[in-house]
Image (tube, rainbow, N blue to C red):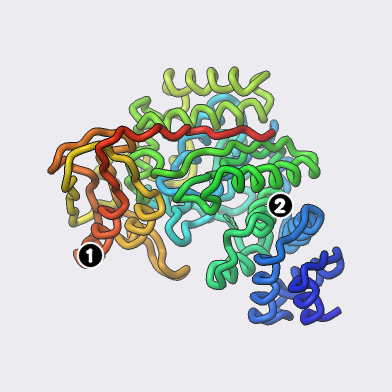
Amino acid sequence: MNMIEIILKKREGSILSKQEIDFFVNGYTKGEIPDYQASALLMAIFFQKLNKEETFLLTDAMRHSGDVVDLSKIKGIKVDKHSTGGVGDKTTLIVGPIAAACGVPIAKMSGRGLGFTGGTVDKMESIPGFQTALAEEDFLALVNQNGLAVIGQTAHIAAADKKIYALRDVTGTVDNISLITSSIMSKKLASGSDAIVLDVKCGSGAFMEEEKDAAILAQMMVDIGKADGKKTIALITDMSQPLGFAVGNSLEVIEAIETLKGKGPEDITELSLVLAGYMIYAGEKATCPEEGKEMAEKALADGSALEKLRLFIEGQGGDVKVIDDYSVFPQAKNHLELFAQTSGYISKIEARRIGVASQHTGAGREKKEDMVDLSAGILLAKKLGDVVEKGSLLATVFGNDPEKIKKAAEEAIAAFTIEQRKPEKERLIHAIIS
Ligand code: URA
C-alpha cells in the first residue's frame, strides 16, 4: 500500500478501505508518513468528505493509536462531558462538581486551549498550586475519594489525534465534520468513561456556525458512542455570544465559583443545570434528564456542589482560599474599559472576535508553545439584548502588557453591534440528540 495511491483515491472522491485508513493513521503516528502527504490527504478529505463508515473506521484507528484508559477501579457509572469548544465556556468547572455531588463519578481528561477557545487545564492552573499532571493511581484514587478529578490529556491517549490535530490546525482542515468527530470521539472512547454527554456548539464562536451542520456533527458522534455501547447524548447549544461575562483563565474560574455559589450569570447557570441533569441521568442517578436537573438545582442551592469544588481543588493541591478570596488568583496589572459610542440595544457580540481579543491579551496561545497569562482576559459588562446609553461600559480588558491590551481592545470593541431595534433572543439549547 502506498500513500500516493490513498491520496489520489480520496482526491477522486472514492471510499477508503479499513486497511487504507489504518495504514495512514498508524504510519503517520509512527512518523513513517511525512507531514506533506498527511496534509494532502487531510485536504482531500476536507473537500471530498468521508462517509459514515469511513468516519467510524478513522475514529477506531485513532482510538487504538495510543493507550486506552481502564477506569474499572472507579466505582459506579463514570460519565464524561465534552464541549466542541467555545468562548467563555467554563461549564466543566461547574457541572463536574454538581454531578459529583449527585453521586456521579467524574474522571475527566481535559485539554489546553488552542486558538481562540480556552481549555479547562489552563483554567484550573490559574488556581495557585493546582496540579493537572497526576499519576494514574492518584487520579483514580481521587475520583474514588472525592467523586471528581481532572487531569491533562496525555500524548499517549489517541496519540494519532495529537499529531493530526496539530497538522489540521496549520493546514486549514479543522472544520470538517468527520475530522472533528474522529478527533473528539477517539479521545472520549480511549478515556474509559461509561457514558458521554456532548455539548456541540453552534454560532459565530463555534466550528459549526449553522445549526444544521452542528446537528450532523452531533448525530455522527452520538452514533459512534452508541456503537461502542456507551450511552451518548448530545446537546446543541448556542455560541453566538460568549457564555457568561468572563473570558480568560482566572476570570472564568471566578465566574464558575460564583455560579456554584448560586450567583452566576443566567446563561451559564441554565446551561450547566441542563448539562448536569443529562450527566446525572446518564450516570443512572435519575430516571430522566428533568429529574437530573432538579437534583442539580438542589446541589447548587444546598451548597453541596460548592463543597465538591472545595474537595476537588484541595485534592489536586490547589489553594482552596480562592473560593472565598478572589485576590488569591493571579492579578492583572493593567486594564482598559470599553464604552458604547452610541445608544440602543446590543444586537451582536461576536463570540469569535471576543475569543480572538482574549487571545491577544495573552489569555490564549497564538502558538502551541506560548505561555498563557492566567490573569488576562475580557470581562463583558453587557449581553445580547441589553439596552445601552452612549458612554455605557461594554467590557473591560485585563492584561499585563499595554500593547497587547490595546490590540485586544480594538478587536473586542469591534465584536459589539448596537442597533435601535430589539434583537430576537437566541435559544440557549437548540436541540437534544440522544
Ligand atoms: N476539539 C477536538 O478535540 N478536536 C477537534 O477536531 C475539534 C474540537
In the image: residue 157, left or right of residue 152: right
Indicate the position of residue 120 as horizontal and vertical percent values: 48, 49
Q: Which callout, 2 or 1, points at the residue further toward the start of the chain? A: 2
State which quadrant residue 246 falls in. Answer: top left
Measure how far apart labels 2 and 1 are at the Cα level. Answer: 40 Å
Label 2 within 8 A of ligand 1 by Cβ: no
292 or 343, nearer to the observer? 343
Circle 1 Cα neighbour tier, 10 Å, few/some/many (<14 / 14–19 / ≥20): some
Question: Residue type at mark 1?
Answer: Asp
Report which residue position mark 2 lands on. Answer: 190
In the image: residue 330, left or right of residue 16: left
Indicate the position of residue 391 as horizontal and vertical percent values: 13, 43
Indicate the position of residue 228 as horizontal and vertical percent values: 79, 44
- Where disc 1 sits, the SS reads loop
- Where disc 2 sits, the SS reads helix
Residue under the point 65% across and 22% down: 285
2 or 132, nearer to the observer? 2
Report which residue position mark 1 lands on. Answer: 401
Residue under the point 63% across and 51% down: 136
In the image: residue 352, left or right of residue 132: left
Question: Residue type at mark 2?
Answer: Ala
Mark closer to the observer (2, 1): 1
Residue under the point 63% across and 69% down: 163
Q: Is residue 120 visible?
A: no
State which quadrant residue 404 falls in. Answer: bottom left
